[in-house]
Image (spheres, rainbow, N blue to C red):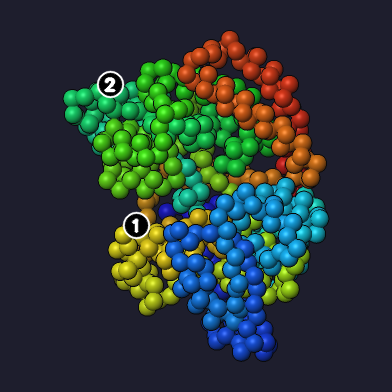
Amino acid sequence: MFRAKKGKVVMSLLLASALLVTACGGKSGEAQDPKGNASADTKEISLLRPSWNNLRPASSELWMWQEYEKMSGIKVKWEELTDIGEKKNVILTRGDLPDAFYQVDWSNGELLKYGQQGLFLPLEELIKEHAPNLQKYLEENEDVRKGLTSADGHIYATPYIDPYPEGNRTIRLWINKKWLDNLGMEVPKTTAELEEALMAFVTKDPNGNGVNDEQGWYMPSGSLGWTFEQMMMGSFGIGNGGRKALGNFIYVDDNDEIQLTITADGYKELLKYENRMYKNGAINKQAFSGVDYDKWTADAAKDTVGAWNWAAIDYIGESIKDDFVAINVLAGPDGDTASLTDSQVAGASSLVVTKDAKDPGAILKWVDYFYSEEGSVFGYLGKEGVTYNVEDGKKVYIDEILNYKDGIGLGAFQYVDNVYGGYFPYIELSPEVRAAAGRKEAPVYTDLTEETLPSVMLPDLPATIQEANESSSIIADVGNYVGQMRVEFVTGTKDIDKEWDNYIAQLKKMGSDKYLEIKQTQYKRYKES
């Protein structure tokens, strides 16, 4: 089964270093080896993080953090806030900052801005000295190191790393296999075959109830542009660069140059493809308004959904999910393919150390354990005999987790932290290990290979403060305009061929050329870093 692109180190290769290098170690009065006993002189660090207390015990009461305090000899004073995205910048004006921000999403521009203001500490030397597991990973995975390095050459945060594109790094198309079987159709491999299948779904009563209630592609309103459309960009020759690039309206062309997706000929053809399917009912007529998540899942439970996009099948609900199979790539009109896959730097700001940290080295030692395989297992699964048992060589959650009323994921979240919400500072476990924890088998995606992955998967490209200021003002207007025009082009309110030149001209007035120039400069700097 496919694991990761060549040159990347996956979890199995970290085991040797994890056995040799532990997260915390030192003399009396310092944090001890996580596998040893806590020091009599326990250090204390303060961490501020998002609150998940509506879903699980407070961090100070969570089994994992209580256990890790014993293992590491470091006591964490947790501060947990709701709506932290709205409050994080205000927090920086407080007299005393926490030692570090944990699981808080800071943009590259914010990391650089506050780093240069002295509020966030540069970490590259601290990582070399105090975080050998993470340092080894950065040395062996150049794309991760580059993705973390700001425009001034400093690293201001430790990452959330996911080396496995077959997991949550890829957004795929899920199509109703039961309906295909009922109609005697094969799983589509091309955009033309998908269109044919979705048209059959809405015209031939594949659920067999005698009512014309079937939908083709159908998701909560507003999802089309960043799920279906972004996946299809790979089929129309503008998908190279990965999910983060496409989210920033850019791709990498055949000459290794940055280009804009939203002005490309391939995007025009993709909009015409969407318009044709929308007009014929193969894309749900409420793609842009009127359907929330609850309505969508309720409709799905009635066997009325033909296709949709997401990383994992569970999103659609337990009662219907087994009717769907995944498609990672579809060959476009010119044979192009590229999956909608993200950089393995899934989060670039998972742990940020502030100017008020009393012992930054202790914080880096504390977090480094989670960049070993042993630490990754501990963060997601806990400890053998406590939160999981080994069955036939596989780590399986205890019955209290497996039988939790709200599902296995939230059941595990009552004990361990790194299973919900993302952005944890650690290296994700393989899909096989995570599936086995719930006594499940990981899905196998035969169409997700070296050849179908984007040849380049960019992180958010590091920006100077000036670049961040310039591009943010441009992209706010451009993003709103592109979203508005998508609705009009796809629904047919405006004719794509007749209006395309006006659309391009308006983007230029808004600064699209300047935005492209900034992104090209950032890509050049990224490659040279």
Q: Is residue 153 visible?
A: no
- Relative to 505, does residue 47 appear above or below in the rendering? below
| Label 1: few (<14), some (14–19) or many (≥20) C-alpha neighbours in 10 Å | few
Left or right relative to 382: residue 212 = left
Q: Judging from the image, what secondary structure is the residue with disc 2 in?
A: helix
Given residues 204 and 362, the one toward you in this image is 362
Q: Residue at x 63, y 37 (%)?
A: 248
Counting residues from the N terminus, which is met first, the one under dot 1 or under dot 2? Answer: 2
The residue located at (71%, 64%) in the rendering is: 97
The residue singled out by tag 1 in the image is: 406
- Residue 422: numbered disc: none
At label 2, which amino acid type do we have?
Thr
Specify the quadrant of the image occupied by residue 50. Answer: bottom right
Quadrant, the N terminus: bottom left
CA separation, marks 1 and 2? Answer: 37 Å
Give the x, y percent position of residue 209.
18, 29
**Disc on res. 203:** 2
Relative to residue 369, is residue 197 drawn left or right?
left
Compared to 9, does 251 lie above or below?
above
- The kind of residue tagged 1 is Asp
On screen, 8 above or below 79?
above
Disc 1 versus disc 2: nearer the observer: 1
